[in-house]
Image: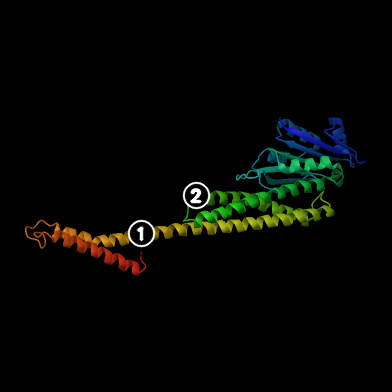
Amino acid sequence: MGTTVCYLVRGNGELAVDPPEEVLQAGIASPTDFVWMDVEAPGDAEYARLKHLYGFHDLALEDCANPETRTKLEAYDGTVFLVCRGVNHAPGGEEVDTVPLFCFLGDTYLVTLHPFPVRSVGAVCDRLRKNPRLLLEGPDRVLHLLIDHLVDHYFPLLDAIDERLDRVEDEIFREASRDALPLIFRTKKEVLALRRSAAPLRDILGVLANRGIPHVRAGTQLYFRDVHDHTLRIAETLDSYRDMLTSSLESYLSQVSNRLNDIMKRLTIVATILLPLTFITGLFGMNFEELPLTRGPVGFWLVAGGMGLLAVVLALYFKRKDWW
């Protein structure tokens, strides 16, 4: 069962919240009244009611029933249908949760639907309760307020990602910590998810700001142009974050490769030092009755001392060559 909130503004400035059905129908039919209806988690009953009240196209209502519908802008029989995606990001959280917002715009009405709570809708409702006269500016202006708040909620998440990129750099240059790789991939996944939401929204706002769209007045286009500038900035920031993450991944892999090469070099030096010692011990371990230095009391110490001296000489040589 969905939750519906309805605002009806009369031509004389009178505001009614959740008016009776017959009053709502009269307001929808009146050319001087304005209705904003917001529906959260709509079900079959809500879709049937919207079909009855506004005559929305079945394809548009079918899109509203699918939370994965892509961002788009279409026109249906005198109604502008807009799908955009917002982010519900809790302060301090790291998960990206994108939520669709479906909007139907007409000359005297605005209908918004969303399967889950959308922060921008709540923010605009709070703003309208404090200043109901904003509704007098028309449905296109309320649509602008919704999208403006929706876009503004991207910026705290961008700040959180920026801080996480600093953590990624610290993890990488702290001897290529193992925590860096999952952090890089998680952040890259979130950046791509945000970009998939922000880039189409940027294109749609470009259309709303610069082309003649039905039910969007020239004065409101200026406001949409300002929001479009914000989406351009968001898209450019996400592109830079994506490039930084790609560079961070390359740096991490380079660090790991350098560490592996350093370890292999040290192991090779140790093996090189042990190689002549192994040869000497193998030589004196052969099963012959007569071997030099095997009969005397000092033979063992001479061989052991020579092996130790050889190991020291080789170690000093490698150190001087800066191989160790």
Residue 303 point in image, percent of width and height: 17, 61
**Residue 227 vs residue 265, the one in the foreground:** 265
Residue 43 point in image, percent of width and height: 70, 32
The numbered disc on residue 240 is none
> Based on the displayed image, in which of its 4 quarters is residue 279 positioned?
bottom left
Residue 42's place in the image compared with 162, above or below, is above
Rounded to the nearest whole Å, what is the CA distance between mark 1 and mark 2? 23 Å
**In the visual, does 223 lie left or right of 261?**
right
Q: 10 Å neighbourhood of mark 1: few (<14), some, or many (≥20)?
A: few
> Based on the displayed image, in which of its 4 quarters is residue 298 positioned?
bottom left
**Residue 296 vs residue 140, the one in the foreground:** 296
Indicate the amino acid at tag 1.
Met
Residue 65 point in image, percent of width and height: 68, 37
Kindly tell me whether residue 212 is visible in this rendering.
no
Indicate the amino acid at tag 2.
Asp
Mark 2 sits on what residue? 179
Residue 199 point in image, percent of width and height: 66, 53
Query: Which residue shows up at 51% across the image and 52% down it?
Result: 180
Q: Quadrant of the N terminus?
A: top right
1 or 2: tag closer to the N-terminus: 2
Question: The residue tagged with tag 1: helix, strand or loop?
Answer: helix
Outermost residue, left side:
289
**In the visual, does 175 lie left or right of 297?**
right
Mark 1 sits on what residue? 264
Query: Which residue shows up at 16% across the image and 62% down it?
Result: 302
Rendering colour mode: rainbow
Label tally = 2
